[in-house]
């Protein structure tokens, strides 16, 4: 909450340079570096870098959430769902010279710094930190990225892509450079820091935490443990990497994009994941009232009569591959009205019936059993956040890298404590909610104790599933790391299958961005989604992950 208040005025100004939606044509904005390096405003260049990074994080998170069932995925066939256009925007915002590219704006900052008596180390250090993280993520999502020939159009007009390991190495180099620039606590020179308010100590913690997440994927335990021993990483909510949204509706719209989509005069427009809602409902997860807002108290096909008009699948006999696994095909009870992975049915008139995004992280309504309708200005008015790397996530990473089940159990508990505490703190942002429905401290403690006890009592796959389910629930709203974890481990195996019995191989990576393929004669588009990242050494698709 304190970060929302702290940055609200900043966001109202800065977000004027972007729109929260992936469909925004950012290249139509006036470029802050079109004037030339000696005339461009370094602060606007840094704003552009930070906002391009934020938008990319939202895209990575959304695609990862869809594939791992944290969010709903429309469409039965993976290859048809994720076209060659999927990563176009991410690629452009990372490299483009059209005023929105992170790399080109960092290069412009370096030119300004070299020609100026003013020290812009802060700007360059922040930019290189965000670019390094983005390059690693590009590798994680498409297997390759441009680096050795990137950003030098005169010499390399059609840059070749580097393999994933080489890109990771280059990203580590950028992190080293960023840390050296930020270590002395350089002056921010009037810059607007949208993430840490100019606190370079927190930026260095982030640099180390980006290293941590790479060590998880590459299983570098000694390097991981060394950073943990240093204590200089994201370990508390005060250090969380997140982007705070505001409540302004127009010119610019600073609200959380999911809020803007769901809290409209015509009702909600997003379907929530049946798997996630059902898992949380069955476990009694105390975060469920914060994640989702129910507009009705019952769901056709579950605890209300089937209804062909609003949920046509409520009249359908589930197919054998759902029956065999005991999975819910269509409806979750208690008004948790969503859709199951791969459901490609049309859109019925259910906008004032389906479950909407809640108070966390979208800034919507807290679910107090009021069963009212969503609408403009309801709840927290969209003043939510974009979770990117939270301290609770890091505790789960520590669990992944733990040397024993007992140690892993300790980090499971810590991660749940931090996650639930942060989520519950957002309840007060909905001034019209009846917070007597909020879980009590005793209920929260009982839930955490139950999950840890179940983990301790389980063995093998059962134990891994408990850990993975809680990790995925914790990642709601910022699910980027779920995609890597799922490919790395194959857990949880409890996720629902696709509606289609054979949806094609699970995407181990996405296709190359088509805009780059079209303009770069050195690139050839792939024919499938089965290319594996260098750290993904599991069996090839379609046998892995096993739940697919």
Image (cartoon, helix red, strand yellow):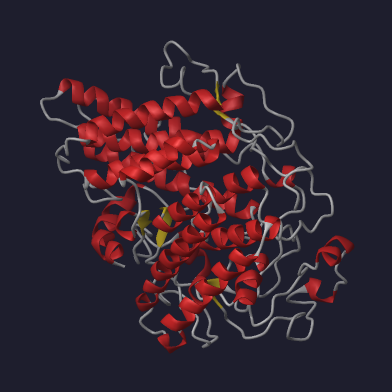
Q: Is residue 56 above or below residue 292?
A: above
Q: Quadrant of residue 469?
A: bottom right
**Res 111 visible:** yes
Which residue appears at 23% of the width and 31% of the height?
181
Which residue appears at 56% of the width and 55% of the height?
405
Residue 124 picture location, percent across and down? 27, 32
Q: Depth check: 435 or 237 in front? A: 237
**Res 93 visible:** no
Q: Is residue 90 above or below residue 96?
A: below
- 53 sits left or right of 488 in the view: left
Residue 153 picture location, percent across and down? 43, 17
- 61 sits left or right of 113 in the view: right
Q: Depth check: 236 or 78 in front? A: 236
Image quadrant where one finds the N terminus: bottom left
Which residue appears at 41% of the width and 38% of the height?
211
- 331 sits left or right of 126 in the view: right
Residue 65 picture location, percent across and down? 59, 54
Residue 389 picture location, percent across and down? 42, 51
Q: Depth check: 249 or 228 in front? A: 228
Looking at this view, name the residue that lies furthest to the left.
Answer: 117
Q: Depth check: 274 or 84 in front? A: 274
Looking at this view, name the residue that lies furthest to the top.
Answer: 155
Number of numbered tags placed on the structure image:
0
């Amino acid at each position: 909450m304190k970060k929302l208040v702290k940055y609200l005025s900043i966001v109202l100004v800065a977000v004027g340079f972007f729109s929260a939606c992936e469909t925004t044509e950012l290249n139509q904005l006036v470029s802050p570096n079109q004037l030339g390096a000696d005339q461009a405003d370094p602060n606007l260049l840094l704003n552009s870098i930070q906002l391009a990074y934020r938008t990319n994080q939202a895209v990575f998170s959304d695609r990862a959430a869809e594939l791992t069932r944290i969010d709903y995925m429309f469409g039965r066939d993976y290859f048809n769902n994720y076209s060659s256009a999927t990563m176009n925007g991410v690629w452009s915002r990372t490299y483009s010279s059209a005023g929105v590219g992170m790399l080109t704006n960092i290069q412009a900052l370096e030119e300004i710094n070299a020609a100026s008596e003013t020290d812009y180390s802060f700007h360059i250090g922040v930019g290189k930190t965000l670019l390094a993280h983005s390059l690693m993520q590009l590798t994680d999502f498409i297997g390759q990225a441009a680096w050795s020939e990137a950003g030098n159009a005169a010499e390399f007009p059609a840059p070749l892509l580097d393999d994933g390991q080489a890109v990771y190495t280059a990203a580590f180099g950028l992190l080293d450079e960023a840390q050296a620039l930020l270590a002395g606590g350089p002056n921010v020179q009037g810059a607007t820091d949208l993430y840490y308010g100019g606190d370079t100590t927190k930026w260095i913690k982030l640099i180390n935490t980006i290293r941590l997440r790479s060590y998880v994927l590459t299983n570098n335990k000694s390097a991981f443990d060394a950073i943990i021993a240093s204590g200089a990483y994201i370990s508390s909510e005060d250090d969380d990497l997140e982007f705070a949204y505001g409540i302004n509706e127009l010119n610019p719209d600073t609200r959380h994009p999911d809020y803007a989509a769901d809290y409209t005069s015509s009702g909600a427009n997003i379907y929530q994941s049946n798997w996630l809602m059902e898992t949380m409902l069955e476990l009694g997860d105390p975060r469920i009232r914060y994640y989702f807002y129910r507009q009705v108290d019952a769901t056709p096909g579950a605890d209300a009569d089937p209804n062909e008009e609003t949920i046509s699948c409520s009249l359908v006999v589930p197919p054998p591959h759902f029956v065999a696994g005991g999975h819910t095909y269509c409806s979750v009870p208690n008004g948790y009205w969503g859709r199951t992975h791969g459901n490609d049915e049309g859109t019925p008139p259910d906008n004032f019936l389906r479950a909407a995004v809640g108070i966390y992280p979208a800034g919507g309504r807290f679910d107090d059993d009021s069963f009212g309708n969503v609408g403009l200005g309801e709840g927290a008015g969209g003043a939510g956040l974009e979770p990117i790397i939270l301290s609770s996530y890091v505790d789960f990473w520590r669990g992944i890298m733990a040397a024993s089940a007992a140690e892993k159990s300790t980090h499971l508990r810590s991660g749940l404590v931090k996650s639930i505490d942060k989520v519950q703190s957002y309840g007060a942002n909905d001034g019209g909610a009846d917070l007597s429905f909020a879980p009590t401290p005793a209920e929260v403690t009982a839930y955490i104790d139950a999950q840890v006890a179940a983990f301790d009592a389980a063995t093998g796959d059962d134990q891994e599933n408990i850990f993975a389910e809680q990790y995925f629930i914790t990642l709601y709203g910022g699910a980027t790391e779920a995609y890597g974890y799922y490919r790395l481990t194959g857990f949880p195996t409890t996720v629902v299958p696709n509606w289609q019995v054979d949806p094609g191989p699970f995407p181990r990576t996405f296709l190359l961005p088509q805009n780059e393929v079209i303009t770069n004669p050195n690139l050839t588009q792939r024919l499938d989604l089965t290319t594996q990242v260098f750290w993904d050494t599991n069996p090839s698709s379609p046998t892995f992950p096993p739940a697919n």
